């Protein structure tokens, strides 16, 4: 730090046997010193393993025309359901066999905040079993006071929902687990599930440091408190490769937590232009492209024969949003919207197969895809999500 004239900001992760290495610290460079110039100078110190930028990430969806009034949830349909869509996730066929997931299964939404009071979400918002609400005490000793439904790493407080700007996080959550069968609004892939929110995206995006803290927060809930957390949903991306972020994903892998990530919305081949975090090669990563209701690769969707695993519905996806006056619904498009269909699928498989490992859940999801012409040579599996057999 002295050599670069850098200031200490915070400790992002502490070195330990489990965290495999030294402390990870966030530094502030002095004005006029570029990151490119500072990194080699810092890395010459034998006490430093590596130095890298604290990237800025942004969520990966674009709002659709909200005047669109057709509430068709085609992403949930099966080819045998009514209404039907051959290109839906086939969730409706699983539902028809009573497979609507188990409320004992948790998933983490790493994103913006989630409107936990939304009437179509509230019943499926998880609570931290080790914490007591509102007593001002960190009951479970995880470093976060009164983290009942997760934590806001962007604002560093326990209020995960901060207003209508938290629409993206609220939307992806509805696709995973909006309450089904209540005669109102939408249904998620899982009608019952428990969702925790690790908020790290604010109005101006989020940083590597906060993404790492969000991932480690959820990993720790499983590692030290036995929470049955099977997957995290990561509908975000940007920046370049980060060893520190990849290390955090690996810590999740060691705890059998899938890291399900959007492939990105730049219409590019991730094999040649990696998109992070979906392009990390950790075995617990599932990278998700987007298809339309007619089975085409969505025009915006990234792809990759070796780097993107499968596709799921991501164009014109209706789900929960805060709304300007009252909790509402809207159609968004993006690989951000495809990803939570897969996260819901992971929770559904885990519900039907208690004790399944992350590897088993991933194998089931990738092994059940429907071969799809538009995805041949564009994804690892060449197919689209199909949960009809879950
Ligand atoms: Ca706590
Ligand atoms: Ca907050």
Image (spheres, grey):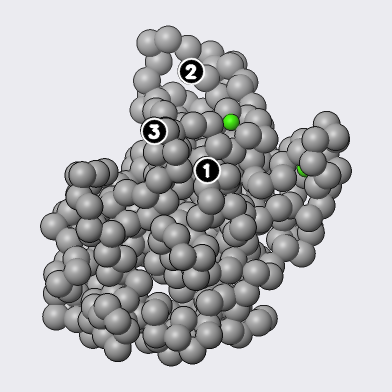
Going from the N terminus, do you reach mark 2 or mark 1 first?
A: 2
Q: Are marks 2 and 3 in contact (CB under 8 Å)?
A: no
Q: Position of residue 233 (x, y in %)?
A: 48, 57
Q: Position of residue 257 (x, y in %)?
A: 59, 65
Number of other residues with Cα within 10 Å of mark 2, as a class: few under 14, some 14 to 19, many 20 or more: some
Residue picked out by circle 1 = 115
Q: Are marks 2 and 1 in contact (CB under 8 Å)?
A: no
Q: Secondary structure at mark 3?
A: loop
Going from the N terminus, do you reach mark 3 or mark 1 first?
A: 1
The residue depicted at 51 percent of the width and 55 percent of the height is 120
Residue picked out by circle 2 = 29
Residue 176 vertical position relative to residue 92 in the rendered view, above or below: above
Going from the N terminus, do you reach mark 2 or mark 3 first?
A: 2
Number of other residues with Cα within 10 Å of mark 1, as a class: few under 14, some 14 to 19, many 20 or more: many
- Quadrant of the image containing the N terminus: top right
The residue depicted at 13 percent of the width and 57 percent of the height is 299
On residue 344, the disc is none
Quote the CA–CA distance across marks 2 and 3.
40 Å
Q: Quadrant of residue 289?
A: bottom left
Q: Please give left or right for residue 41 compared with residue 155 in the image.
A: left
Front label number (2 vs 3): 3
The residue depicted at 37 percent of the width and 49 percent of the height is 329
**Displayed-image quarter of ligand 2:** top right
Residue picked out by circle 3 = 324
Quote the CA–CA distance across marks 3 and 1.
12 Å
Residue 269 visible in the displayed image: no
Quote the CA–CA distance across marks 2 and 1.
36 Å
- Is label 1 within 8 A of ligand 2 (CB to nearest ligand atom)? no
Residue 372 visible in the displayed image: yes
């Amino acid at each position: 730090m002295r050599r670069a004239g850098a200031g200490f900001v915070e400790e992002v992760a502490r070195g330990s046997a489990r965290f495999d290495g030294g402390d990870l610290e966030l530094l502030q460079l002095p004005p006029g010193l570029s990151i490119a110039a500072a990194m080699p100078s810092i890395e010459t110190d034998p006490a430093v393993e590596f130095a890298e930028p604290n990237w800025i990430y942004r969520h990966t969806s674009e709002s659709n025309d909200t005047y669109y009034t057709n509430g068709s949830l085609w992403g949930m349909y099966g080819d045998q359901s009514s209404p039907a869509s051959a290109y839906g996730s086939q969730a409706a066929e699983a539902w028809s066999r009573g497979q609507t997931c188990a409320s004992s299964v948790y998933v983490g939404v790493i994103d913006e905040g989630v409107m936990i009071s939304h009437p179509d979400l509230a019943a499926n918002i998880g609570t931290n079993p080790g914490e007591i609400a509102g007593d001002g005490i960190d009951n479970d000793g995880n470093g976060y006071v009164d983290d009942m439904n997760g934590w806001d790493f962007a604002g560093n407080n326990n209020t995960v929902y901060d207003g209508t700007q938290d629409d993206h996080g609220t939307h992806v959550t509805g696709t995973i687990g909006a309450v089904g069968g209540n005669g109102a609004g939408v249904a998620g892939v899982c009608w019952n599930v428990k969702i925790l929110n690790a908020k790290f995206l604010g109005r101006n995006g989020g940083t590597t440091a906060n993404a790492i803290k969000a991932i480690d927060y959820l990993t720790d809930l499983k590692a030290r408190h036995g929470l049955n957390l099977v997957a995290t949903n990561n509908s975000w991306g940007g920046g370049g490769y980060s060893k520190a972020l990849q290390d955090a994903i690996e810590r999740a892998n060691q705890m059998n937590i899938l890291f399900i990530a959007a492939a990105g919305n730049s219409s590019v081949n991730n094999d040649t232009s990696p998109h992070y975090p979906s392009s990390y090669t950790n075995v617990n990563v599932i990278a998700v492209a987007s298809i339309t209701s007619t089975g085409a690769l969505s025009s915006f969707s990234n792809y990759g024969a070796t780097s993107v695993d499968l596709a799921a519905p991501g164009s014109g996806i209706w789900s929960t949003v805060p709304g300007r006056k009252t909790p509402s619904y809207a159609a968004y498009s993006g690989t951000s919207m495809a990803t939570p269909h897969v996260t819901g699928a992971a929770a559904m498989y885990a519900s039907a197969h208690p004790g399944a490992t992350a590897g088993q859940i991933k194998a089931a999801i990738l092994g059940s895809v429907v071969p799809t012409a538009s995805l041949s040579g564009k994804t690892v599996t060449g197919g689209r999500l199909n949960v009809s057999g879950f």
